[in-house]
Image: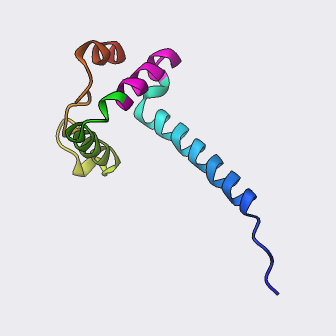
Amino acid sequence: MRKPQDIDAEIKARKALRVRQFGELVVATGADGLDHEVLAGVLLAAVEASKQPETLEAWRRKGAGFFRPESARGADGAADDVGAGLEPDNHRAAAG
């Protein structure tokens, strides 16, 4: 007889994994050096700007480049503008 699945435990484990992976991504991108209020502002601006399909595609390319091995990246380590779709004031605040 098969042991019953513990669905609640699986869901909890997947959520914990997702939170850990988001944390690792924040650290890997260097965003852990940002003040939490700045990081929240950047994320909120990104959510707002993500309503534009061309912005999402530019960010998708940028993100794909981040996950490629260093040797596969361009000379500057990136292919697209980081702030694509963000308003200039938001981009300056996040960068400074």
Depth check, front residue: 96 or 41: 41
Q: Quarter of the image for the C terminus: give it.
A: top left
Left or right: 39 as drawn, with respect to 65: right
Depth check, front residue: 59 or 68: 59
Residue 16 location in percent, x, y?
65, 47
Q: Is residue 38 magenta?
A: yes
Residue bounds of the magenta highlight: 33-47
Left or right: 50 as drawn, with respect to 1: left
Q: How many marks?
A: 0
Q: Quarter of the image for the N terminus: give it.
A: bottom right
Q: Is residue 13 magenta?
A: no
**Residue 91, quarter of the rendered image:** top left
In terms of secondary structure, what is the magenta stretch mainly?
Answer: helix
Residue 51 location in percent, x, y?
30, 35
Residue at the image position 23 percent from the left and 29 percent from the top: 85
Depth check, front residue: 74 or 37: 37
**Residue 89, quarter of the rendered image:** top left
Q: Is residue 36 above or below residue 56?
A: above
Q: Is residue 2 above or below residue 11?
A: below
Left or right: 81 as drawn, with respect to 66: left
Residue at the image position 79 percent from the left and 83 percent from the top: 2
Residue at the image position 35 percent from the left and 48 percent from the top: 67
Q: Is residue 72 above or below residue 46?
A: below
Residue 8 location in percent, x, y?
74, 57
Q: Which residue ends up furthest to the front in the rendered image?
A: 51
Residue at the image position 50 percent from the left and 15 percent from the top: 37
Q: Which residue ends up furthest to the bottom in the rendered image?
A: 1
Residue 42 location in percent, x, y?
39, 23
